[in-house]
Image (tube, helix red, strand yellow):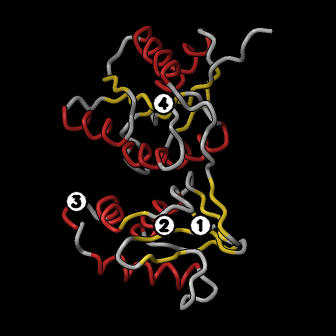
Amino acid sequence: MSPAPAKVLVVDDEPALARALAINLRAHGWEVVTAADGRSALDAAATEHPDVVVLDLGLPDMDGTEVIAGLRGWTSVPIVVLSARQHGEDKVEALDLGADDYVTKPFAMNELMARLRAAVRRSQDASPAPSAVEVGDLVIDLARKRVSRGGTDVRLTPTEWAFLELLARNVGRLVPRAQILREVWGPAYEHESHYLRVYAAQLRRKLEHDPARPRHLVTSPGLGYTLEP
């Protein structure tokens, strides 16, 4: 029995280009899924489990860098950026966020396919990380950046989500205060521990049954926070 074809998710809002990519990739044995915006891309990645993602940065609903960050919250699927942006700063930002390769438009199709094959070969994601984390009656959907409690969606601010997402990606493990401040607010805020107290209290009010006696979002005084299962 021959192996199943590798699956590629093509994310581009230019219909003609997306169609041309799909035709060429299918002709060379790839299974192709397409998405025209960032939200559709994140949904497709969660449901289709592609082997590699081809991502344009100029999307209508969000910047492609936000898609990279969203994917890297829960999966190590290879991401090959395909963009008209040629500035070094754009490439550095995309690669720093977790992209595996960067191809500029216009491009040669044979080069793109060679890079896709190489990205799949390099991939170490033999068993994909879960796209959602369940903690008590909370479901934290890392792929879609949503959280529900007892089946009801809970509205979080972007900063509250970033805090919770970091803890969810390390569920059951202590995350040091400095790491949370650095990753959520930035390196300049590593000593602003009062931010953590304020946002932890806000999250507990929204997520805990008894915010005064938290069961899941637990503080280790002087050390950091743990999301307990």
User: Mark 3 is on which residue type?
Assistant: Pro
Circle 3 is placed at which residue position? 187
From this viewpoint, which residue is outermost toward the bottom?
212
Q: Secondary structure at mark 4?
A: loop
User: Mark 2 is on which residue type?
Assistant: Leu
The part of the image, by quadrant, that contains residue 26 is top right
Q: Position of residue 205 (x, y in %)?
A: 53, 85
Circle 4 is placed at which residue position? 78
Residue 164, label in figure: 2
Q: Nearer the viewer, mark 1 or mark 2?
A: 2
Q: Secondary structure at mark 3?
A: helix
Q: Measure the C-alpha gap from mark 3 to mark 4.
A: 27 Å
Circle 1 is placed at which residue position? 147
With 53 as the anchor, is 216 left or right in this view? right
Tags 3 and 4 in contact by the CB under 8 Å rule? no
User: Mark 1 is on which residue type?
Assistant: Val
Tags 1 and 2 in contact by the CB under 8 Å rule? yes
Residue, x 37% and y 81% (percent of image)? 197
Say above or below: 229 vs 141.
below
Q: Nearer the viewer, residue 200 or 158?
A: 200
Query: Sequence order check: which comes first, mark 2 or mark 3?
Result: 2
Q: Nearer the viewer, residue 163 or 52?
A: 163
